[in-house]
């Protein structure tokens, strides 16, 4: 798969900048409560030669903790954030971070 950063804001699937293939780097983790693992996650990201382009985190809220994550607790520098199930619900929540140099569009879909 080849991904184009949003330098001109136009999405061009299956094409490459300068003819070079680029790799989309994705990190996934099941946090079972992100708040107390935030520094561990940051240390992992910092250990990579190149940070992930996409970070997906499930079970953001801990099972036995009633704390609602503040936006400052879930923001990550250099990434746009998308979330589901974090605001006032019994769901555990999902966070998806996408590197800010990619064109991202948020939408709500019914299924």
Image (spheres, rainbow, N blue to C red):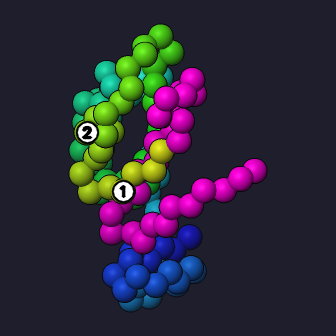
Sort mark 2 into few (<14), some (14-19) or many (20+) by Cα contacts within 10 Å: few
Which residues lie in the magenta part?
Answer: 84-111
* Relative to 101, residue 98 above or below: above
Which residue corresponds to mark 2? 72
Where's residue 29, x and y in %?
A: 48, 35
Image quadrant holding the N terminus, namely bottom right
Q: Report the front residue among 49 and 32.
A: 32
Label 1 vs 2, first from the N-terminus? 2
How far separated are the C-alphas under marks 1 and 2? Answer: 13 Å
* Relative to 61, residue 8 above or below: below
Where's residue 72, x and y in %?
A: 25, 39
**Along the horizontal axis of the image, is 80 left or right of 78?**
right
Where's residue 85, x and y in %?
A: 54, 36
Q: Main secondary structure of the magenta part?
A: loop
* Relative to 28, residue 1 above or below: below
Secondary structure of the residue carrying numbered label 1: strand
Residue furthest front in the image: 88
Residue 29 seen from this side: no
Residue furthest right in the image: 111
Query: Measuring 46% from the left and 25% from the top, which residue is drawn there?
Result: 61
């Amino acid at each position: 798969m080849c991904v184009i950063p949003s330098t001109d804001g136009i999405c061009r699937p299956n094409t490459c900048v300068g003819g070079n293939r680029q790799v989309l780097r994705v990190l996934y983790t099941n946090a079972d409560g992100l708040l107390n693992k935030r520094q561990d996650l940051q240390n992992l990201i910092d250990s990579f030669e190149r940070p992930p382009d996409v970070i997906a985190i499930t079970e953001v809220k801990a099972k036995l903790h009633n704390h609602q994550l503040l936006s400052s607790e879930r923001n990550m520098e250099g990434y746009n954030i998308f979330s589901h199930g974090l605001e006032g619900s019994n769901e555990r929540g999902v966070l998806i971070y996408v590197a800010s140099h990619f064109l991202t569009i948020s939408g709500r879909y019914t299924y």
